[in-house]
């Protein structure tokens, strides 16, 4: 008999949906699987103001299929100019969090923060109202090797920040290293992390062996196998309640990925929950999938658990070679043209 599994409908606590035609092309995939998603604010220009976020939210809702109950949760992009007053206003307007992009760290991060410790009054206001700081945890120092940027961020920025402001809620986004998993496991209950499917399934060989694979390039970059294993252990281990689903599904046109300077971002939204099911299945921990996908994040953010459920079947599913992405463009998903061993049934 085919194995099947019914879980509370998941939430994606780290999602990029872009804007315009691209938005319309990608949102339905997440809406089919997820009940809610935390929408990343790295548009061009970035979403720094409440009014922009509310307008963006309306555009997301307008792109949903009829009868969808999908709920976008909005975030604001932290900049050197953000003020404590803006934090209070954002909180009052229902914004869920602020996202820290160290300037230059990743896609659309040029408007990001140059000195986090210069923003202490802003961070104190966030702690006061209970708004989490979401961190892209990589230093941008040119002298630091790209594979070490997350570990150095922990030493230089995150640990000092947690000492300085222990009551600030922090989500260490898309963690990729054993050091990050350990920091989160050992930190207070104010600290949690999202983990992507690619960092649980792939290592840096999948990026570089046999030729450069631009569709496996994201930031933070894939790491060694020992780090991938540490992430799997973290989401299944004794502190697993601190880790939750955040796909970091980040669509880019095929032409922007397959070129001399291919951009960072992996599109996984159409098969996100199936990829995570594979991870937990391989680890012999399918009983932990629901907590990771549908409970831990909601609890951390103080949101109610979802009412609906989804059902997954262990049955191979072919992933499309590409999807249409706006005018004439193609979007290549993770696993394009290959199979995933689980399938979400409608
Ligand atoms: C993301 C994107 O494309 O917006 N890219 C990525 O490689 N993850 C940005 C981000 O989350 O760093
Ligand atoms: Zn991201």
Image (cartoon, grey):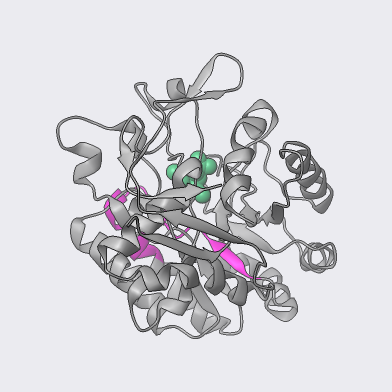
103 lies left or right of 266: right
Residue 152 place in picture, x, y as percent: 34, 64
Q: Is residue 76 a member of the stretch shown in magenta?
A: no
- Residue at the location (49% across, 41% down)? 270
* Residue 288 position (above or below residue 104): below
Residue 147 appears at what percent x and percent y? 28, 53
Q: Quadrant of the N terminus?
A: bottom left
26 lies above or below 85 = above
Q: Nearer the viewer, residue 222 or 282?
A: 282
Task: Check if residue 135 falls in the magenta segment.
Answer: yes
**Residue 28 relative to residue 163: left or right:** right
Horizontal and vertical percent for residue 261?
A: 37, 26
- Residue range in magenta is 132-153
215 shown above or below 169 = above
**Residue lying farthest left?**
210
Q: Residue at x 45, y 60 (%)?
A: 137
Q: Residue furthest top?
A: 328
Horizontal and vertical percent for residue 11? 58, 60
Describe residue 138's horizontal placement relative to residue 11 as left or right. Answer: left
Q: Evaluate whether residue 315 shows in this view.
A: yes
């Amino acid at each position: 008999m085919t194995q099947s599994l019914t879980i509370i409908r998941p939430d994606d606590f780290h999602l990029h949906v872009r804007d315009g035609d691209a938005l319309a092309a990608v949102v339905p995939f997440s809406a089919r699987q997820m009940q809610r998603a935390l929408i990343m604010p790295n548009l061009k220009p970035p979403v720094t103001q409440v009014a922009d976020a509310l307008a963006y939210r309306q555009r997301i809702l307008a792109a949903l299929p009829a009868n969808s109950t999908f709920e976008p949760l909005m975030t604001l992009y932290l900049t050197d100019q953000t003020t404590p007053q803006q934090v209070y206003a954002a909180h009052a307007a229902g914004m869920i969090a602020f996202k820290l992009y160290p300037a230059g760290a990743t896609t659309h991060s040029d408007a990001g923060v140059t000195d986090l410790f210069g923003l202490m009054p802003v961070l104190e206001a966030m702690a006061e109202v209970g708004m989490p700081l979401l961190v892209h945890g990589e230093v941008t120092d040119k002298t630091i090797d790209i594979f070490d940027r997350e570990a150095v961020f922990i030493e230089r920025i995150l640990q000092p920040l947690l000492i300085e402001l222990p009551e600030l809620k922090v989500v260490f986004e898309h963690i990729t290293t054993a050091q990050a998993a350990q920091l989160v496991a050992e930190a207070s209950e104010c600290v949690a992390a999202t983990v992507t499917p690619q960092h649980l399934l792939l290592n840096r060989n999948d990026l570089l062996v046999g030729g450069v694979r631009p569709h496996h390039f994201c930031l933070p970059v894939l790491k060694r196998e020992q780090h991938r294993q540490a992430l799997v252990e973290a989401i299944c281990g004794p502190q697993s309640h601190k880790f939750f689903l955040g796909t970091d599904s980040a669509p880019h046109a095929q032409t922007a990925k397959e070129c001399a300077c291919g951009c960072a971002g992996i599109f996984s939204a159409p098969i996100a929950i199936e990829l995570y099911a594979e991870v937990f299945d391989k680890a012999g921990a399918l009983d932990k999938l629901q907590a990771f996908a549908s409970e831990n994040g909601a609890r951390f953010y103080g949101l109610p658990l979802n009412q609906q459920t989804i059902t997954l079947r262990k049955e191979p599913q072919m992933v499309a070679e590409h999807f249409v992405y706006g005018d004439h463009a193609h979007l290549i998903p993770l696993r394009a043209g290959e199979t995933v061993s689980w399938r979400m049934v409608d």
